Image (spheres, grey):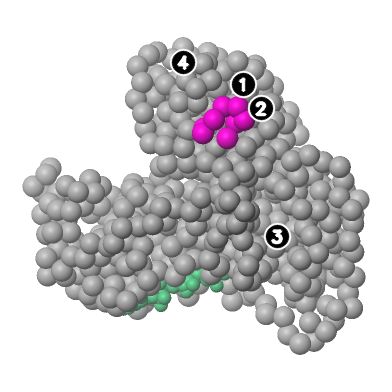
């Protein structure tokens, strides 16, 4: 089985989010970038398929040279080969089209992306990619087994979960649950050394257009101060929620 | 030309989110000077939609489409959009709508903006405001394709009642075998509990509860409020609560009217996921916990004393206001 894991290069979850150039660009100053958490769960599941079922695992990112450390980290975790499509990831549709080309050229059986990246939260790349290449698709995937060309996938639904049978080629939008938090791997020294020697191939972008553009950003209005209610006076809290906040 | 809106049902009955997306569709249609067509699958009755602005409802009655299937539903909605010559298609932020969104966008050659929070800022260029960076910011996004697909954030626009009657029209999209490459074999869903996605009130608890054996009071509080229960990430990682309850940046998003956080410190990853909730209450014994900076109301003290007492007060309140 040939697996492709799509890796988004995103600000660390603790990052302060600021904008520059008249609020038109994300300010990367002082921001640490990491593998998108949803993708990391997918990558770890892919490593399981590699170790238990002899799958090969490639990782891909659409982005500039600055994303290479993130791809190297994925190699250090255990991926075999990394591919970087050399283009600025302008919107989800553009990224999906680039990934579709990589997926088709490489003849992958299973493509694991994240249900969304935590920067722009588009949540569109996996579905678009599946539709572009005519593969089966399961989103918010929290369980995945592959047996030959058949797959069983569990997805999170509102209020529960749902299990489906499907077949390869398959695209999943993954998240926590594909593996547990405790299964995530921190690259060790040997992994990091080996990653330096693994191939990281840069390919040029195919000609594709973006469907949308983020023209401006805005931060939420600052919050007013919290109203503290004395622990001995919870009637007051009930009253505030009823008459002031009008939520009960 | 009309605005098409996908209105979701559960067992043939419209979900609250369906009325919200219909209300939103009406606002968009008004801006564009057109009408709203809703598309639904196997709805028992479509009359209710008129009260939220639908002018026409395409009610697809097809046994093959009795259960949600992302690909088949996307295909049917696509055909409805083409039939209506819709330039704007609107869906909700439910797990199902988000599942079919990417498929539908490609099918319609539509640019897609998800997590949209308000009526379009402008019709030309078509610009919408959406959340980004997991609620740490908003982005104004311009969609430059002919057809636009909008995913509306939950509880962002609200319900707007309208008057009028919606004409129901039978619609029979073609369904292909190739739509069913993914076949659902089992669904595991608590039917007696309100879901985090649909809940008006969410009661959430963290590591401050010390152990799973102490969740009785959390469930009771949720019960009194008709709320869904949720938890912080470590609580689900440790197996105190099911993963489906994990909310935050890497869990489920919450956009309820009221979010009550008990024994949750308010880490940035937690807050990012719940910030769209309208009113936040924190109960924590550490007055320095970061959650107090994000909350509207706070009580400093021991949850093990406050929660039982709050349950009593709420019961009294309910008895008085029943
Ligand atoms: C990549 C990444 C992603 C993450 N994503 C998420 C996410 O999606 N969701 C999420 O929740 N977290 C997430 N986290 C974890 C997050 O950083 C915090 O560790 C977590 O939210 C803390 O959970 P907590 O508030 O339950 O526990 P703690 O931080 O341990 O806080 C417990 C709180 O309970 C209070 N307390 C203790 N006893 C009592 C008592 N008797 N009465 C009242 N209060 C009491 C304490 O004062 C404390 O404030 C993520 C972390 C990372 C690195």
Residue B147: give its label.
2
Find the distance from the CA under tag 2 to the CA under tag 3. 27 Å
In the rendered image of this protein, does residue B280 appear above or below residue B212?
Answer: above
* Cβ–Cβ under 8 Å for marks 4 and 1: no
Where is mark 3, residue-wise?
A8
Find the distance from the CA under tag 4 to the CA under tag 1. 14 Å
B219 magenta-colored: no
Chain under label 1?
A: B
Of B17 and A239, nearer the camera is A239
Q: Nearer the viewer, mark 3 or mark 4?
A: 3
* Relative side of B247 to B292, left or right: right
Name the residue rendered at 14%, 49% in the picture.
Answer: B318
Where is mark 1, residue-wise?
B86
Circle 2 SS class:
loop
Residue B55: give its label.
4
Q: Position of residue A140 (x, y in %)?
A: 60, 53
Name the residue rendered at 67%, 20% in the picture.
Answer: B82
Can residue A115 be seen here?
no
Q: Nearer the viewer, mark 2 or mark 4?
A: 2
Of B236 and A203, nearer the camera is A203
Find the distance from the CA under tag 3 to the CA under tag 1. 33 Å
Judge if badges 2 and 4 mark residues of a common chain. yes
Judge if badges 2 and 1 mark residues of a common chain. yes
Find the distance from the CA under tag 2 to the CA under tag 4. 20 Å
Q: Position of residue A40 (x, y in %)?
A: 67, 67
- Outermost residue toward the front? A22
């Amino acid at each position: 089985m040939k697996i492709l894991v799509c890796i988004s290069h995103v600000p660390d979850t603790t990052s302060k989010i600021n904008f520059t150039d008249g609020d038109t660009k994300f300010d990367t100053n002082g921001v640490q970038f990491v593998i998108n958490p949803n993708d990391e769960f997918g990558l770890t599941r892919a490593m399981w398929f590699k170790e238990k079922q002899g799958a090969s695992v490639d990782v891909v990112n659409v982005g500039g040279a600055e994303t290479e450390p993130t791809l190297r980290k994925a190699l250090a975790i255990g991926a075999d080969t990394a591919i970087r499509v050399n283009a600025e990831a302008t919107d989800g549709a553009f990224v999906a089209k680039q990934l579709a080309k990589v997926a088709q050229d490489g003849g992958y059986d299973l493509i694991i992306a994240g249900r969304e990246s935590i920067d722009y939260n588009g949540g569109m790349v996996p579905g678009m990619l599946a539709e572009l290449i005519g593969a089966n698709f399961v989103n918010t995937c929290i369980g995945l087994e592959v047996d030959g060309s058949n797959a069983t996938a569990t997805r999170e639904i509102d209020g529960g979960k749902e299990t489906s049978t499907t077949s390869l080629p398959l695209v999943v939008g993954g998240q926590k649950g594909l593996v547990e938090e405790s299964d995530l791997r921190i690259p060790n020294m040997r992994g990091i050394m080996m990653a330096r020697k693994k191939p990281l191939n840069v390919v040029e972008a195919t000609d594709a257009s973006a469907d949308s553009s983020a023209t401006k950003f805005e931060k939420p209005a600052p919050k007013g101060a919290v109203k503290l209610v004395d622990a001995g006076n919870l009637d007051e809290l009930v009253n505030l929620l009823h008459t002031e906040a009008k939520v009960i | 030309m009309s605005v098409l809106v996908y209105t979701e049902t559960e067992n043939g009955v419209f979900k609250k989110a369906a009325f919200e997306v219909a209300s939103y569709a009406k606002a968009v249609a008004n801006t564009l000077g057109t009408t709203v067509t809703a598309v639904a699958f196997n709805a028992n009755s479509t009359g209710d939609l008129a009260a939220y602005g639908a002018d026409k409802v395409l009610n697809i009655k097809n046994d093959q489409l009795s259960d949600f299937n992302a690909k088949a539903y996307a295909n049917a909605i696509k055909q409805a959009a083409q039939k209506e010559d819709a330039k704007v298609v609107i869906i909700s932020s439910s797990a199902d709508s988000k599942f079919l969104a990417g498929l539908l966008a490609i099918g319609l050659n539509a640019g897609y903006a998800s997590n949209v929070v308000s009526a379009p800022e402008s019709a030309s260029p078509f610009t919408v405001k959406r959340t980004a960076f997991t609620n740490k910011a908003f982005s104004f996004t311009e969609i430059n394709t002919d057809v636009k697909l909008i995913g509306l954030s939950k509880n962002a626009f609200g319900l707007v009642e309208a008057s009028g009657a919606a004409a129901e029209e039978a619609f029979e999209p073609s369904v292909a075998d190739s739509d069913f490459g993914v076949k659902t074999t089992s669904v595991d869903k608590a039917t007696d509990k309100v879901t985090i996605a649909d809940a008006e009130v969410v009661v959430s608890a963290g590591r401050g509860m010390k152990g799973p054996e102490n969740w009785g009071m959390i469930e009771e509080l949720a019960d009194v409020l008709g709320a869904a229960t949720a938890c912080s990430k470590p609580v689900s990682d440790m197996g105190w609560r099911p993963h489906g309850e994990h909310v935050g940046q890497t869990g489920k998003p919450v956009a309820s009217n009221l979010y009550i956080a008990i024994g949750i410190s308010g880490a940035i990853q937690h807050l990012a996921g719940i910030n769209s909730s309208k009113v936040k209450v924190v109960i924590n014994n550490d007055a320095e916990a970061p959650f107090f900076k994000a909350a509207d109301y706070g009580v400093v003290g021991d949850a093990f004393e406050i929660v039982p007492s709050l349950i009593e007060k709420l019961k009294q309140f309910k008895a008085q206001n029943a």
